[in-house]
């Protein structure tokens, strides 16, 4: 049993390239015919490899956490603004009721 990502890397280095080579040979094959234009360069097929190494679930969790932090901060700001505007309107109502022009 592999316990973490480091263990996976160590196991991969112990095994070497042979298992990956066997997997490649059993799974990978050309899907285009020889006559298909734009797929071949001389005798070699054109290929593309995706070099991303990020774990999608880990990336999603990180982005969700960042969004949570932003939303929480914005909620705090909204509450502060609402409180400030309520206090401001209360002060103006009390000043109007008493006829006072002095700012509290």
Image (cartoon, rainbow, N blue to C red):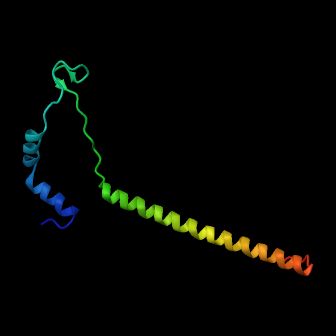
Q: Residue at x 72, y 73 (%)?
A: 86
- Location of residue 87 with respect to 19 vertically, above or below: below
How many numbered discs, if any? 0
Q: Nearer the viewer, residue 73 or 75?
A: 75
Where residue 30 sits, quadrant-wise, is top left
| The residue positioned farthest toward the front in the image shown | 97
Which residue shows up at 39% across the image and 61% down it? 62
Residue 85, given in percent of the width and then of the height, sits at: 73, 70
Measuring from the top left, give residue 23's x and y in whole percent.
10, 44
Q: Is residue 54 left or right of residue 33?
A: right
User: Residue placed farthest to the bottom in the image?
Assistant: 98
Percent from the top left, x then y, of residue 1? 12, 66
Q: Residue at x 55, y 67 (%)?
A: 73
Position of 22 with respect to 46 (left or right) is left
Instruction: Left or right? Give the position of 7 relative to 103.
Output: left
Picture quadrant of residue 93: bottom right
User: Residue 21: which quarter of the image?
Assistant: top left
Instruction: Name the foreground residue: 27 vs 19.
Output: 27
Q: Which x, y percent locates residue 47?
A: 23, 32
Q: Is residue 94 above or below residue 43?
A: below
**51 left or right of 79?**
left
* Image quadrant containing the C terminus: bottom right
Q: Residue at x 57, y 68 (%)?
A: 75
Q: Nearer the viewer, residue 72 or 8?
A: 72
């Amino acid at each position: 049993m592999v316990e973490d990502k480091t263990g996976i890397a160590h196991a991969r280095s112990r095994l070497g390239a042979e298992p990956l080579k066997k997997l490649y040979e059993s799974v990978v094959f050309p899907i285009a015919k020889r006559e298909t234009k734009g797929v071949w360069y001389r005798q070699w097929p054109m290929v593309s490899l995706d070099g991303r190494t990020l774990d999608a679930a880990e990336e999603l969790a990180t982005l969700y956490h960042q969004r949570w932090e932003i939303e929480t901060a914005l909620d705090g700001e909204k509450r502060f603004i609402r409180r400030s505007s309520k206090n401001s309107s209360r002060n103006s109502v009390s000043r109007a009721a008493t006829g006072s022009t002095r700012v509290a």
